[in-house]
Image (spheres, helix red, strand yellow):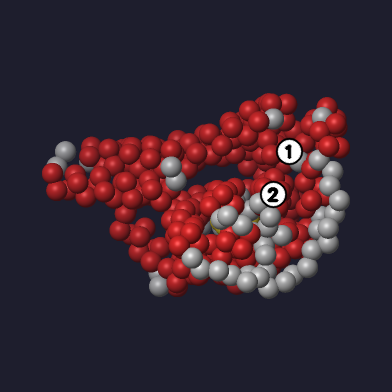
Amino acid sequence: MEIIKDVLAALSGVLNGLPQGLLALAFGFASVPTALAFVAGAAGNALTSSVAVISFQAETITVAGTMGKNLRERLSMIFFGAAIMFFIGAFGLLETIINIIGPVITSGMMAGVGIMLSKVAWDMAKGNKLAGIVSFASGLLTYIATKDLVYTITISVVLSSLVFYFFKKDQISENKKPFVKEKIVRQSLILNPMVLRGALAMVCLNIGANIAFGNINGSIADRDVNVDILAMISSVADMASSLFGGGPVEVIISATASAPHPVWSGVLMMVIMAIILIFGILPKIGKYIPTASISGFLFVLGAIVTLPDNAIAALTTGEASFGVVGAITMIVTAITDPFVGMVSGVIIQFLINIFGF
């Protein structure tokens, strides 16, 4: 039974990544070279026993895709941003940041991420109401009945995708495009002010994501996560992918963390993703899985699993002034991103220490 749950969690992680993978293709990133990133991630997790997996992440794909004027700039932003993140992780700076900011700000970031996930889930559902309603309903009912994230994402994604397929076949046929065989070719990178700005934006986003998402995966799996090692794994993956035309892959909140054997379930998930990308399957099967199909899982993960406990910790830990720090961190994270939320919390904490509250 445990092996079955491990496999289900891995397949759920794959289903979770497919819609974001299609977003990467829309920005011009190649699918076959991105397989290198998943191979690097699988190898890294197997060697370090990390429970935090890497996969397509909508936030970083959107940042790179919108800031870069063309594919060359986008790939350069990803590569140089990953190189900076690798050295940050190699020198242990992410763990140092966690020790400096303390549990209140960390909990505030994680609670803010819960709100972010809930908002993203709601927006996804509004974009495709049929699939969104089915995903929300099935996801909430499944989690309330089972308290299990693996079953939640599996049932909600599969059921909403089936309903979408049977009632929206016309939309699926309209999305058919001829398949173009890709090759792994080394790309020529460029460094200019826009690329540097984009690389630093990627670094800022990933610092917060590695700390917040890494700790969320750790809390789900009930294991410690070394975010410095996580940063190095994702950075090597990004550099390998972008150097040959592939898209960015970063740490995600994955159902594999709740599997009986989270490390190997995560490795299996990344190996399956690599196979899908190597054989060019993503563009073929992705049209059957609407983005809204993961909205139910994301809402459960954000509003029920992530937000409540972390919000309580952020607002009630320590003195009353700490609650203010936690609240501001949580709200700013929710409306911007985890790194900005973290910085805002540190600033408020510094001001309170000087002026009192």
**16 or 67: nearer the eye?**
67
Q: Which mark is residue 57?
A: none
Task: Give the secondary structure at mark 1.
Answer: loop
List x then y, in percent, for residue 11: 73, 50
Q: Which residue is mark 2?
A: 26
**111 or 221: nearer the eye?**
111
Task: Give the secondary structure at mark 2.
Answer: helix
The local crowd at label 2, few if under 14, some if 14 to 19, many if 20 or more residues have their Cα within 10 Å, is few
Q: Is residue 283 left or right of residue 203?
A: right
Q: Is residue 236 left or right of residue 115?
A: right
Residue 301, above or below 47: above
Amino acid type at circle 2 is: Ala
Q: N-terminal of the two: label 2 or label 1?
A: 2
Residue at x 85% of width, y 32% of height:
169
Residue 31, above or below 255: below
Residue at x 68% of width, y 73% of height:
186
List x then y, in percent, for residue 135: 69, 32
Amino acid type at circle 1 is: Pro
Residue at x 78% of width, y 58% of height:
276
List x then y, in percent, for residue 65: 59, 52
Q: Which residue is mark 1?
A: 290
Q: Is residue 154 left or right of residue 196?
A: right
Q: CA distance from mark 2 to mark 1?
A: 14 Å
